[in-house]
Image (cartoon, grey):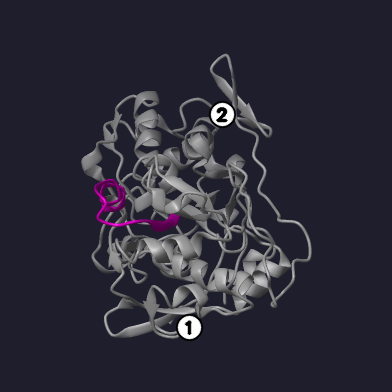
Amino acid sequence: MWEFPTSMAAAPSPSPVTAAAPSRTIGAPTGVWVVVVIVVAAAVGGIGFYAGYEYRGSPAASPATVENSTLSILGAGTLDTIFPEVASQLANETPGISAPAAAQTYEGSLDITSAITTTGALADVAAVADYRLIPGMLEPKYANWEVVFGATPEVLAWQPGNPAFAGATSANWPSLLINATAKVPMGIWNASTDPNGYNEIFSMMLQGMIYDHGNLSAVYSHFYSGAPGSFATGLSNTIIEHESHAAALLAAGTVSAVITYRSYAVVNNLAYVPFNPIVGLAANNSTALSDYAQLSTMITPSLGVFEKVVPAPVLFSVTVPSNAPNPALGAAFVHLLLSPQGAALLSQGGAFTPIFPGWSDDRSAVPSVLAPDVTALPSWAVPLLST
């Protein structure tokens, strides 16, 4: 049984939000939000620099090892726009390799880890939407390291022009969502296959905790049955959907809204409202960590087996699996992802807050080409990954 620890990361909202002051009875705020600060790349003569980073041209440590190779990727569903762009850049910059769409699969992060561990799926790159999954599910047998490369908080997103969400703020969005789903169901994710599923549950609970005097059920109970901390089942005003379908369903009016990553809203041109940083799982100060520690839900990643999950700020991480067909090519992809070019793609439109140097759980295990690109996980994170 894996029980997730609480964790840290902060991603600033790309636009301000007008919100009523929260009326909380639990953990009054005790400081400012901690934010990962990134300086976006500046290109000079074809070589990018930021935060002391120098992109070293073709990222292959040994071009001969990747020549005539095909890059394969297993990635979280919300990466299905950005990662193909990074892969295309790598293919364009490295002679003799290809990165076809047919060799890339994007789905729920728990599906990704299960594909590797139970069905023998092979990939040069594996990326997940919860940085705890690679150490908890893949290491040490299927991976030796991970690198945290970006943060993106949860938001409420809807099709632009939907009048049901006019005037939405980080305080009033629940009432607007409850009214909207009386007519059109809300799209939700499967928490047992996709971290987005349990993160939206936590966002609802945290909204009640902060804005409704500590009542975890104030928002949550309108959309899920099962007491907070137990297995959550969507009510009749929800429809379980896959990320690859959600934007189309919003456009068709089949679902009214989704709670999802800001990155998903941005790349799919959805309207959205940012949450309070704690509600959006972006805050990492002591107040946020204390609030997160009070919550949990249950999932069933294995049939008939219930496992406990607790909240943590949303951090995406990547690795090259131990059985990767082309490990040098996978490392080249990660290097490009951490470069100014990769940061520009990640941050376009405010989708992700790139993290550079990337945070590695084992710097000594990363390929040598990545050594200048990574630093150790923050000290607070090391013990959390081992609990």
Q: Is residue 354 magenta?
A: no
Which image quadrant for residue 328? top left
Rendering coords of residue 53 (x, y %) = 63, 32
Image side of residue 337 versus residue 268, left or right: right
Badge 2 local density, few (<14 within 10 Å), some, or many (20+)?
A: many
Query: Of the residues shown, which amino acid type is indicated by label 2?
Result: Tyr
Image side of residue 291 versus residue 84, left or right: right
Instruction: Residue under label 1, please give it.
Output: 229
Badge 1 local density, few (<14 within 10 Å), some, or many (20+)?
A: some
In the rendered image, is residue 176 in sight? Answer: yes
Which image quadrant for residue 141? bottom left
Rendering coords of residue 377 (x, y %) = 63, 57
Nearer-the-camera pick, 204 or 295: 204
- The residue that appears at 56% across and 68% down in the rendered structure is 207
**CB under 8 Å between discs 2 and 1:** no
Query: Of the residues shown, which amino acid type is indicated by label 1?
Result: Gly
Q: Please tell me whether mark 2 or mark 1 is closer to you in this view.
A: 1
- The residue that appears at 62% across and 69% down in the rendered structure is 211
Residue 55: mark in rendering: 2
Rendering coords of residue 93 (x, y %) = 40, 24
Nearer-the-camera pick, 348 or 253: 253
Rendering coords of residue 325 (x, y %) = 30, 48
Question: Label 2 vs label 1: CA separation?
Answer: 46 Å
Boundaries of the magenta span? 245-260
Image quarter hosting the N terminus: bottom left
Image side of residue 216 versus residue 192, left or right: right
Where is 13 relative to 291, above or below? above
| Furthest residue in direction left, as rendered | 102
